[in-house]
Image (cartoon, helix red, strand yellow):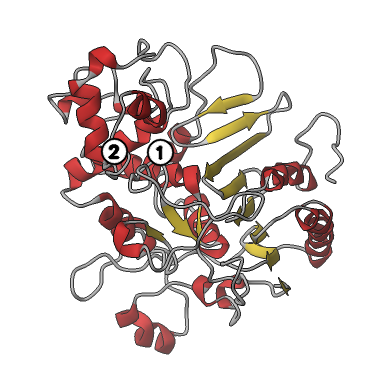
């Protein structure tokens, strides 16, 4: 069953169909704002009456011509039908420009054997797109003066015996550390015992002599999940909170990302099952309780809220975002590069796409952001299909990114 949601109003912030995108206001200010009859200025340090961090008010969408919105809707609808519609896609797609949702569509069933349909509130595991939250959490601590990007990791974990590994090299995948997905298996970890982040750290420290493929830090880019498992531990060490608590308190709650959470075993009953391309369910294994590199569940609308919060500069200073989107791996020529938690493609004409893909078990996701056009492409699903990553081709609908206009079919 396919459900189509069209949002043709000028602002998703006030749409009754999109309650999660209402202007976010402090509850105890609501009455005074109503009486005053004016909009409150955006704030990043709002506080509730109980002293806890309050809600962040996102700005309204910028003007967008109806003709442009319709043009983009038609392109997205055609691409959905001709690419995702011809695959085994089971999930949701959302495309926005200047804060306006211009295309949103859901397909399939959360449980392939169930009767319920995927909808705007269905949560999906976004796998490595979770790294964008981990990276920005670390950069938030940098803004607050609680750490410095070029601090060595050993400063916070004195047992860590890998000289030269800094917070920055963990963020940009230049640490030289090997991927735990491989070395834990080679070291014959008991797969009946679910790994914790601390287990990865202790294995790196205590069994270093047995671990292969350790490289000199900051010599080359090597995408590695170990980096982000360690960064989650760093967040916990610096804040005194668990990683799931910190992400919830710092991002999810203030932004009212009400359907988003970091998975823990306590969430087993509310997560969406995942399937391989044939439709066979994939069960959790000993790697599934680790976080920082993966394990955030969210919805397309909540992920759009994350995008809007970043592009509005309400959560981070411009210089922080500039550091996050700076290319750090320039030893190889080409358009592909990596920042601090963000992949990017930088084209010869100066155009830049900031994005991250994710894959874990049968879950995969694409989160594509176009800073120049203030546009976002989001696709996520729980039945594996490579078609999700082909959504990148839609960037040329918003601007001249490729030197030759590609066929978006």
| Whether residue 287 is visible | yes
- Disc 2 element: helix
The disc placed on residue 347 is: none
The disc placed on residue 142 is: 2
Q: Is residue 72 left or right of residue 117?
A: right
Q: Is residue 258 left or right of residue 187?
A: right
CB within 8 Å, label 2 to label 1: yes
**Residue 126 point in image, percent of width and height:** 51, 51
Q: Which of 24 and 186 lies nearest the eye of the viewer?
A: 186
Q: Is residue 115 above or below residue 160?
A: below
**Could you say which quadrant of the image residue 112 lies in?**
bottom right
* Disc 1 crowd, CA 10 A, few/some/many (<14, 14-19, 20+): some
Q: Which of 302 and 270 lies nearest the eye of the viewer?
A: 270
Q: Is residue 227 left or right of residue 87?
A: left
Residue at x 27% of width, y 40% of height: 197
**Could you say which quadrant of the image residue 77 lies in?**
bottom right
Please give the residue where the numbered disc 1 appears in the rendered image.
320
| Whether residue 163 is visible | no
- Disc 1 element: helix
Q: Looking at the rendering, in which quadrant would you find the N terminus? A: bottom right
* Disc 2 crowd, CA 10 A, few/some/many (<14, 14-19, 20+): some
Q: Earlier in the sequence, mark 2 or mark 1?
A: 2
């Amino acid at each position: 069953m396919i459900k189509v949601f069209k949002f043709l109003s000028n602002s998703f912030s006030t749409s009754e169909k999109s309650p999660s995108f209402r202007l976010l206001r402090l509850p105890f200010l609501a009455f005074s704002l109503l009486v005053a009859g004016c909009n409150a200025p955006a704030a990043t340090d709002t506080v509730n009456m109980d002293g806890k961090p309050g809600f962040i008010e996102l700005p309204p969408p910028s003007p967008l011509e109806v003709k442009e919105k319709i043009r983009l809707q038609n392109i997205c609808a055609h691409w959905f039908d001709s690419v995702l519609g011809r695959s085994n896609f089971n999930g949701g797609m959302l495309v926005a420009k200047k804060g306006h949702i211009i295309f949103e569509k859901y397909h399939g069933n959360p449980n392939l054997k169930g009767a319920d349909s995927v909808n705007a509130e269905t949560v999906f595991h976004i796998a490595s797109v979770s790294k964008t939250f981990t990276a920005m959490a670390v950069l938030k601590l940098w803004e607050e003066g609680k750490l410095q990007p070029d601090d060595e990791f050993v400063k916070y974990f004195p047992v860590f015996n890998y000289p030269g590994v800094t917070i920055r090299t963990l963020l940009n995948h230049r640490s030289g550390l090997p991927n735990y997905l491989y070395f834990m298996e080679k070291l014959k970890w008991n797969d009946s015992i679910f790994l914790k982040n601390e287990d990865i750290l202790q294995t790196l420290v205590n069994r270093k002599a047995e671990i292969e493929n350790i490289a000199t830090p900051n010599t080359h880019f090597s995408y590695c999940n170990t980096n982000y498992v360690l960064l989650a531990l760093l967040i916990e060490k610096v804040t005194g909170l668990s990683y799931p608590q910190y992400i919830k308190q710092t991002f999810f709650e203030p932004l009212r990302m009400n359907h988003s959470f970091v998975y823990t075993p306590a969430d087993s009953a509310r997560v969406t099952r995942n399937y391989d391309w044939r439709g066979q369910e994939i069960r959790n294994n000993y790697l599934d309780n680790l976080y920082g590199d993966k394990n955030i569940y969210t919805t397309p609308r909540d992920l759009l809220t994350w995008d809007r919060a970043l592009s509005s500069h309400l959560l981070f200073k411009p210089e922080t975002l500039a550091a996050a989107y700076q290319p750090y791996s320039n030893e190889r020529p080409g358009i592909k590069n990596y920042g601090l938690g963000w992949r990017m493609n930088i084209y010869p004409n100066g155009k830049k796409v900031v994005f991250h893909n994710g894959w874990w078990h049968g879950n995969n996701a694409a989160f594509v952001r176009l800073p120049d056009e203030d546009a976002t492409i989001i696709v996520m699903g729980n039945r594996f299909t490579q078609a999700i990553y082909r959504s990148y081709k839609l960037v040329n609908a918003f601007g001249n990114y490729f030197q030759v206009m590609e066929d978006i079919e």
